[in-house]
Amino acid sequence: MGSIKIIPLKSLDKTLFENALFITGYQGFGMVGYLTTRHLVRELKLEKVGLIKTKHMPEVTLYGDNGLLYPFELYAGEVSGRKVLVLLNNAVPHIHERTDYAEFIASLMKAFKVKEALLVGGLDPSLKETEDEKYRWIPIGNTKISLNAPVLKNRHVIGPLALTMMFTEAYGLSGAVILAYTDLYKPDPRASAVAVEIIGELLNIKIDTSSLLEEAKIIDAIEMEREKIEKAMESELAEKKSRLSYI
């Protein structure tokens, strides 16, 4: 973990984060973890307090409303009297650093003495037992969190989220993994809205998800247009083949 460290942009006095709720996720299935944390940062108006430097930093950035975008950003704030820390992973850690990155995150939570960790990801919808089932969850350590959904048992979790789960528990921390059913192969803001609503309930506030649902409508419209174009191209190709068969 020597090549991974936190670079403070504000004071990172550890007492400021003691008993905080730590939230993070990655760009996995449906990009649910990423879209959820990005939305929380915006809607809860959290302050960027630091960034995480890795040996193999992704060589990409952009300038937006909040200044320069860093691959791995740490945000903090207070919500309904509760401290909240959000790690926003705008990129995926390099494949050779993912183990060290996940362990660093766990060690950071331990050093900050956070109370609970919430890890967010997407889940294959084929696992649904009922049509109205929206998510499953996994408890970590001796958590006091209890969610009104089935616990995901005897199923593999993969990727950086799995590593973060393992190190979170190994470092003696507690929390929960929220896994919203998602479209596996495209961004799914609707699934992220489910995760956001659950986190809002845990924070005893209602977090607006209208922008996520609007994003979902835009993605649906683009997908429908793409399907129309594909069908039109297939129809035109079939017609050309039919003409050629008579030459």
Image (tube, helix red, strand yellow):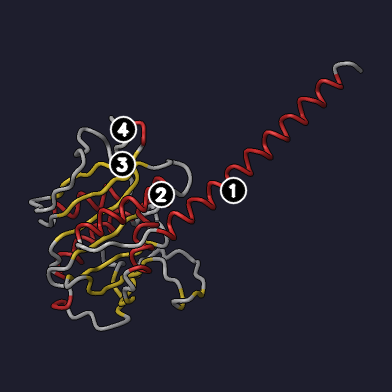
Question: Mark 2 or mark 3: which comes first in sequence?
Answer: 3
Horizontally, residue 30 falls left or right of residue 165, namely right
User: Which residue carries the number 2 mark?
Assistant: 190
Quadrant in the picture for the C terminus: top right
- What's the residue type where badge 2 is placed? Arg
Label 1 and label 3: CA atoms lie apart by 24 Å
Label 1 and label 2: CA atoms lie apart by 15 Å
- What's the residue type where badge 3 is placed? Lys
In front: 111, or 21?
21
- What's the residue type where badge 1 is placed? Ile
Label 4 element class: loop
Residue at 50% across, 67% down: 60
**Is the Cβ of the residue at disc 4 closer than 8 Å to that at disc 1?**
no
Q: In which quarter of the image is residue 199?
A: bottom left
Crowding around mark 2 (Cα neighbors within 10 Å: few <14, some 14 to 19, many 20+) is many
Question: Mark 1 or mark 2: which comes first in sequence?
Answer: 2
Horizontally, residue 9 falls left or right of residue 185, namely left
> Which numbered tag is attached to residue 128?
4
Residue at 76% across, 25% down: 238
**Is the Cβ of the residue at disc 3 closer than 8 Å to that at disc 4?**
no
User: Which residue carries the number 3 mark?
Assistant: 134
Image location of residue 105, percent across then percent down? 24, 62
Label 2 and label 4: CA atoms lie apart by 16 Å
Image location of residue 116, percent across then percent down? 15, 60
Question: Mark 1 or mark 3: which comes first in sequence?
Answer: 3
User: Which residue carries the number 1 mark?
Assistant: 222
Q: Quick check: 42 above or below 166?
A: below
**Is the Cβ of the residue at disc 1 closer than 8 Å to that at disc 2?**
no
Question: Mark 3 or mark 4: which comes first in sequence?
Answer: 4
In front: 99, or 85?
85
Q: Quick check: 182 above or below 74?
A: above
